[in-house]
C-alpha cells in the first residue's frame, strides 16, 4: 500500500502534541529522584522519597484499599458488562432495548459529580428504607465503581462482538449446542481478550476515581486518590512524585508488554495466513 | 418439438427421478410458508417439496428470500405462517440444535479458537458420543475431504478451499438427514470453484444426503442441481430440472436470470398452419413452435437464446422452416471459445447472437466483421413463449 | 421481551419442545435454556436500573423538596419521605427558582459552558492534526503512536493534573526554565530588566492547560478511529478531479470525519462541563464552575435540595449533547 508522507505541519503538531502529553510525566519521574525537599529546586539524585513513601502508612493503607476495591469492582464490572455487551450486540429486538442501551452509554459521558451525588442519595435512601447499606464505605464505593465501569466493559465487548460473524454462534447451535453451551464454547472464548482489556480498564478507572469515591465513601474508607488529593491540595510534595513514578512505571511496563504480546500474535497470525494461502 | 436431449439430469440413469414418481413421499415439505420482518415480506406463501437424495438449489438474486427460507429450514428463523416438515416430522417449535439438519455457512463460520479436528468434532461432542467413536468418525471424515494432515491446524492457517472443506466436513460428520449449503462456493476463486463443484457433487452422490443449496450463481446451480427453484421477491417462480429451466423457462424473470435471451413483446396470431407472433416494432412475423398453446391475440413475450440463432453472411436456404431476420453487425465481443455478436435488426432493436469460434480467428477465409450485413435464423421451436 | 419474532425462538419453546417424558431437572434446564436471553439481559439491566436510573429519580425527588437548612441532611430527607405518607405531596419549584434568581448559579453554568466549549475547540485544534498524522503513518508507527496516546490514559489522572502544579508554579519548572533563558538573554545584552515569573498557576490559563491535557486522548481516539477507516483513495480521486490539497481537505476529509469530530468533541465537552478536580487544583480559588458549586452546595452548605436541583439543571444542559452522542453511538453500531 502506498503511504503518503505526512506534511511538515502535521509532523510538528504531532511533536508538539506528544511533548505536551509527556512533559508532565517525565517531570514527575525526574523530580521523584530529587533530593531537595523544595520540589522546584534540583538538589541532586536521591531515592529517599521512595523510602519515605514506604514509611507512609496512610498512603500504603489507602493503596491497599484502592487495589482491593479495584479488583472486586473490575471483576463484577466484567461480569455485568459482558452480559450487557452481549445483549446489545446480539439481541436485536427486546422490550426496553432503547432504555437499556441508553443506560449503557449514559455513564460514559455523565459528569462524575452527578453520578456521585445520585449514588450517594440512593445509598442514603436505601439505608432509610431497608437498612442497607449501613453507612458508607468500601461496599458503596465498590458498587459505584461497578456501575460506571461496567458501561465501559459493555461498550468494549459490544465492539468486539459486532466485528465477529454471528454465524459462528449459529453454527454451534446448528451442530447441536444449546444456548448456554454456545455462550461457553464460542462466545466467551472469542470475547475473552476484550474481557481482559475490559477488566484492566475497569481496574484502572476504579484506581483513578476521586470524585465519585468522595461522594460515596464513609469515614475510614479513604481511597488512594482521596489521600493523594488531600495531600496535593496543599501543594507539591516529593513523596507523591515517587508514588506517581511507581504507578507510571507499572502501567508503562504493563501496557508495553501487552502491546508487544498482541503485536507478536498478530504477526504470527499474518505469517500463518500467508503460508496457508501459498500452499 | 424436437428436444432429443431433454430427459432430466439425474446422476443415476436407471432410477426414476423421485419428483416424477406419483405418490412418492417428499423428504422436506414446505407448506404455505410466509416470513415477515415487520412490514417486509421476505418469503411469501411458499410451497415446496424436496425428495430424498436430491441436490436442490434455491436460485435468485440478493433479497429474493432464498437465504431466509434456508434459515427457516435450519431453525434460525421461524415462519410467520405455514410449516416445515422434515422426514414427516413437523419442525415448528423445534430449536435449531434439535433439528436433523446441518448447515454449511457462507462464511464457513469455523470456530477460530479450535483446531480443524475440534471444529469437526464439535457437533459429535454435543451428541455425547463416546470419545473413541468421535475420534474415528472425525478421522474418517477428514480423510474423505483430504484434510487428515491438517487436523491440528487452526482455521486461519488454512487456505480458502481447505476452510470450505472443513466446514463441509463439520456439517457432514453429524450425518444429517439434510445438509443446507449457503452459497457454498461463493468465497472461492473461479478455478477453485469449478473443481470444488464436482467434488461436492461427488460427495453428495456417495453419501446420499439430501443437499439444499442457496446460490445466486446460475452456472453453479445449473451444474450442481438435480432441480432448481428460481426465486424472486419472496416467491418461487419455477421449480424444474436445470435443463428444463434453461430450455423452457416459464417467465421473463427466469429466462433472463438464467442465461441470456433476446426478448420480444407482441401478440400471438393463430391460423391454420400454426402460431405466429407479431412483435411490436418488427416488420416480419416470427413463427412459433407447433406446441404453442396460447390463444389468438394474447400478449406474450418471446425469448430466443443467443446460441439458438445461426448467423451467416448469406441467406440460409431452408427459408421455409426457419425464422430469418436480416441485420447489420453492431458489435462483436470475442470471448475465446465463442463470440457474441450484437446485430442491429432495424427499428432500434439489437439481437444478441453467440457463435462458436470453430476456426482460428484469422485463418478462416473471411470472419464476420463490424458493419457486415448478416442473416439471423432460428428454428420456430427455439422460440420460447412466455406469458408471465 | 422480544418484539422481533425472529429472535424469540426460545420463548415458545418451553411449551412445545418434545421434553414431556424427561426428568424434572432436565426440564428445568431446558426452561432455563429457553429463557437464556432473559437471563443474560436481566442481570445488567437490573443493576443499571437500581444503581443508575433510580438514583436519578431520587435526585429529581429531592430537588423538588423543601430544604430545612438548620437540620442535618439525614433528617432532611427523612422528613420529606414521611410527608409522602400523607395524601398531599409537597412539591416545590423553589430550588429551581432560587437557581434562577441567584447570579452565582447562572454565572457558574455559563462559565462552565464557556470553559468546556473553548477547551473542546482547542482539543480539536490539536487533536485533529494529531489523529490525522497517526492515521496516515506506517503500520508500525501507527501502533507506537497510538500506544503513546493511550498510555497517559492508563496512568492516574489525578497525578497527571498534579504534575502541572509543579510545572506551572511561580517557582515551578516552566518559570525556572524561562528564568534560565532570560538570564542568558541578559548576559547577551538583549534585556536588562529583572526576570518576572509568569503567573500561570491558579489562573484560567492553567485551567485550560489542565483540561486540554486531560481530555486530549478522548478527542484523538474517536477521531483516529474515524480517519483510520477512511479510504485515502478518495483523496487521490478528489485530486485527480482537480482539487488542491486544501480543497480536498475541506470537501472530502472534513465532511467524512464529521462523526469522529462529533464523538470526540462530545467526549470532551460533556465531562469538561461538570469537571471538578482540575479547577480545584489548577484554577483560580474562586473559579465558578458548576461541578464545584454542586460539590460545595452539597458538602459545605449541606443544602441537598439545591445541590440536587443544580444537578438536574446541569443534566438539562447536557441532555441534548448526550442524546447526540447516543445517536451517533447507535449509528456506529449499525454500520
Image: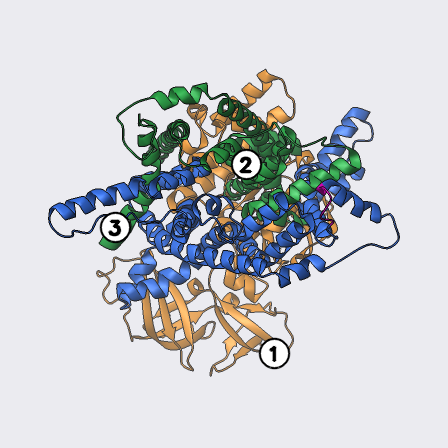
Chain colours: A green, B orange, C blue
Quarter of the view holding residue A91: top right
Q: Main secondary structure of the magenta part?
A: loop
Q: Nearer the viewer, mark 2 or mark 1?
A: 2
Residues beneath discs 3 and 1 located on the same chain: no
Q: Is residue A262 above or below residue A18?
A: above
Identify the residue position indicated by label 1 in the image: B272
Magenta span contains residue C70: yes
How far across and down, in percent of the image, does residue C323 sit?
Answer: 58, 56
Magenta span contains residue B80: no
How far across and down, in percent of the image, does residue C84 sit?
Answer: 83, 49
Identify the residue position indicated by label 2 in the image: B205
Q: How many marks?
A: 3
Identify the residue position indicated by label 3 in the image: A12
Quarter of the view holding residue C232: bottom left
Q: Is residue B302 above or below residue B108?
A: below
Label 2 to label 1: alpha-carbon separation? 49 Å
Label 2 to label 3: alpha-carbon separation? 68 Å
Identify the residue at horizontal 51%, vertical 24% (top origin): A58
How far across and down, in percent of the image, does residue A194 sit?
Answer: 50, 35
Amino acid at each position: 500500500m502506498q503511504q503518503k508522507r505526512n506534511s511538515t505541519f502535521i509532523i510538528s503538531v504531532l511533536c508538539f502534541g506528544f511533548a505536551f502529553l509527556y512533559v508532565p510525566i517525565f517531570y514527575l519521574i525526574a523530580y521523584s529522584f530529587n533530593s531537595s525537599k523544595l520540589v522546584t529546586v534540583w538538589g541532586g539524585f536521591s531515592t529517599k522519597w521512595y523510602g519515605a513513601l514506604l514509611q507512609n502508612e496512610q498512603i500504603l493503607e489507602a493503596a491497599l484499599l484502592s487495589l482491593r476495591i479495584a479488583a472486586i469492582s473490575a471483576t463484577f464490572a466484567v461480569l455485568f458488562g459482558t452480559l450487557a455487551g452481549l445483549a446489545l450486540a446480539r439481541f436485536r429486538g427486546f422490550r426496553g432495548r432503547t432504555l437499556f442501551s441508553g443506560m449503557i452509554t449514559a455513564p460514559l459521558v455523565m459528569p462524575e459529580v452527578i453520578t456521585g451525588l445520585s449514588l450517594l442519595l440512593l445509598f442514603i435512601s436505601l439505608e432509610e428504607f431497608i437498612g442497607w447499606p449501613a453507612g458508607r464505605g468500601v461496599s458503596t464505593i465498590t458498587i459505584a465503581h461497578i456501575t460506571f465501569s461496567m458501561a465501559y466493559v459493555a461498550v468494549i465487548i459490544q465492539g468486539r462482538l459486532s466485528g465477529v460473524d454471528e454465524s459462528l454462534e449459529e453454527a454451534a447451535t446448528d451442530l447441536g449446542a444449546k444456548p448456554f453451551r454456545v455462550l461457553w464454547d464460542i462466545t466467551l472464548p472469542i470475547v475473552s481478550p476484550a474481557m481482559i482489556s475490559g477488566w484492566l480498564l475497569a481496574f484502572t478507572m476504579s484506581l483513578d476515581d476521586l470524585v465519585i469515591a468522595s461522594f460515596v465513601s464513609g469515614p475510614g474508607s479513604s481511597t488512594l486518590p482521596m489521600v493523594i488529593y488531600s495531600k496535593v491540595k496543599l501543594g507539591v510534595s516529593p513523596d507523591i512524585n515517587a508514588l506517581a513514578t511507581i504507578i507510571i512505571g507499572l502501567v508503562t511496563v504493563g501496557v508495553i508488554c501487552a502491546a508487544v504480546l498482541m503485536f507478536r500474535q498478530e504477526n504470527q497470525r499474518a505469517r500463518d495466513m500467508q503460508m496457508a494461502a501459498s500452499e | 418439438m424436437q428436444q432429443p436431449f431433454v430427459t432430466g439430469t439425474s446422476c443415476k440413469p436407471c432410477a426414476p427421478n423421485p419428483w416424477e414418481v406419483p405418490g412418492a413421499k417428499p423428504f422436506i415439505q414446505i407448506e404455505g410458508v410466509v416470513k415477515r420482518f415487520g412490514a417486509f415480506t421476505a418469503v411469501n406463501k411458499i410451497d415446496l417439496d424436496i425428495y430424498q437424495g436430491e441436490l436442490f438449489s434455491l436460485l435468485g438474486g440478493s433479497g429474493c428470500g432464498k437465504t431466509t427460507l434456508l434459515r427457516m429450514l435450519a431453525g434460525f428463523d421461524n415462519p410467520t405462517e405455514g410449516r416445515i416438515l422434515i422426514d414427516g416430522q413437523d419442525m415448528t417449535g423445534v430449536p435449531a440444535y434439535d433439528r436433523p439438519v446441518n448447515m454449511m455457512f457462507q462464511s464457513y463460520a469455523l470456530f477460530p479458537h479450535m483446531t480443524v479436528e475440534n471444529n469437526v468434532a464439535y457437533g459429535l461432542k454435543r451428541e455425547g458420543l463416546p470419545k473413541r467413536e468421535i475420534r474415528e468418525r472425525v478421522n474418517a471424515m477428514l480423510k474423505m475431504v483430504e484434510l487428515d494432515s491438517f487436523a491440528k491446524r487452526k482455521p486461519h492457517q488454512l487456505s480458502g478451499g481447505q476452510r470450505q472443506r472443513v466446514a463441509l466436513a463439520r456439517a457432514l460428520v453429524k450425518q444429517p438427514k439434510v445438509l443446507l449449503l449457503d452459497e457454498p462456493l461463493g468465497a472461492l476463486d473461479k478455478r477453485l470453484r469449478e473443481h470444488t463443484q464436482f467434488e461436492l457433487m461427488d460427495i453428495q452422490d456417495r453419501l446420499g444426503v439430501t443437499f439444499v443449496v442457496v446460490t445466486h450463481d446460475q452456472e453453479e446451480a445449473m451444474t450442481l442441481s438435480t432441480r432448481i427453484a428460481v426465486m424472486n421477491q419472496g416467491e418461487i417462480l419455477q421449480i424444474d430440472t436445470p435443463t428444463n429451466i434453461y430450455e423452457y423457462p416459464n417467465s421473463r424473470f427466469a429466462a433472463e436470470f438464467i442465461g441470456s435471451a433476446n426478448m420480444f413483446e407482441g401478440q400471438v396470431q393463430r391460423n391454420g398452419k400454426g402460431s405466429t407472433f407479431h412483435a411490436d416494432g418488427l416488420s416480419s412475423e416470427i413463427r412459433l413452435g407447433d406446441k404453442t398453446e396460447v390463444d389468438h391475440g394474447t400478449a406474450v413475450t418471446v425469448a430466443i437464446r443467443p446460441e439458438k440463432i445461426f448467423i451467416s453472411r448469406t441467406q440460409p436456404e431452408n427459408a421455409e422452416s426457419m425464422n430469418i431476420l436480416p441485420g447489420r453487425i453492431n458489435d462483436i465481443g470475442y470471448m475465446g471459445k465463442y463470440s457474441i455478436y450484437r446485430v442491429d435488426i432495424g427499428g432500434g432493436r439489437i439481437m444478441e447472437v453467440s457463435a462458436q469460434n470453430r476456426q482460428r480467428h484469422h485463418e478462416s477465409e473471411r470472419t464476420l466483421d463490424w458493419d457486415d450485413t448478416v442473416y439471423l435464423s432460428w428454428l420456430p421451436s427455439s422460440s420460447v413463449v412466455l406469458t408471465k | 421481551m422480544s418484539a422481533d419474532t425472529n429472535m424469540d425462538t426460545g420463548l415458545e419453546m418451553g411449551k412445545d419442545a418434545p421434553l414431556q417424558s424427561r426428568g424434572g431437572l432436565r426440564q428445568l434446564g431446558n426452561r432455563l435454556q429457553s429463557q437464556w436471553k432473559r437471563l443474560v439481559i436481566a442481570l445488567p439491566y437490573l443493576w443499571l436500573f437500581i444503581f443508575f436510573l433510580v438514583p436519578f429519580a431520587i435526585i429529581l425527588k429531592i430537588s423538588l423538596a423543601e430544604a430545612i437548612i438548620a437540620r442535618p441532611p439525614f433528617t432532611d430527607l427523612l422528613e420529606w419521605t414521611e410527608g409522602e405518607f400523607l395524601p398531599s405531596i409537597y412539591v416545590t419549584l423553589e430550588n429551581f427558582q432560587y437557581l434562577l434568581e441567584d447570579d452565582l448559579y447562572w454565572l457558574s453554568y455559563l462559565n462552565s459552558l464557556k470553559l468546556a466549549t473553548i477547551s473542546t475547540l482547542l482539543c480539536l485544534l490539536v487533536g485533529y492534526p494529531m489523529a490525522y498524522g497517526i492515521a496516515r503513518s506506517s503500520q508500525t508507527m501507527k501502533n507506537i503512536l497510538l500506544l503513546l496516546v493511550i498510555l497517559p490514559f492508563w496512568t492516574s489522572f489525578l497525578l497527571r493534573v498534579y504534575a502541572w502544579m509543579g510545572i506551572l508554579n511561580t517557582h515551578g519548572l516552566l518559570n525556572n526554565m524561562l528564568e534560565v533563558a532570560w538570564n542568558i538573554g541578559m548576559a547577551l545584552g538583549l534585556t536588562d530588566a529583572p526576570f518576572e515569573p509568569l503567573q500561570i498557576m491558579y489562573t484560567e490559563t492553567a485551567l485550560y492547560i489542565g483540561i486540554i491535557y486531560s481530555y486530549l486522548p478522548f478527542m484523538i481516539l474517536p477521531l483516529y478511529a474515524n480517519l483510520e477507516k477512511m479510504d485515502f483513495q478518495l483523496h487521490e480521486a478528489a485530486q485527480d478531479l482537480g482539487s488542491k490539497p486544501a480543497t480536498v481537505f475541506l470537501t472530502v476529509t472534513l465532511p467524512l470525519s464529521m462523526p469522529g469530530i462529533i464523538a470526540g468533541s462530545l467526549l470532551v465537552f460533556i465531562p469538561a462541563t461538570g469537571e471538578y478536580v482540575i479547577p480545584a487544583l489548577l484554577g483560580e480559588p474562586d473559579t465558578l464552575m458548576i461541578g464545584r458549586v454542586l460539590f460545595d452546595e452539597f458538602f459545605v452548605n449541606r443544602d441537598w435540595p439545591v445541590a440536587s436541583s443544580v444537578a438536574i439543571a446541569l443534566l438539562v444542559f447536557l441532555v441534548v449533547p448526550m442524546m447526540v452522542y447516543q445517536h451517533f453511538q447507535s449509528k456506529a453500531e449499525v454500520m
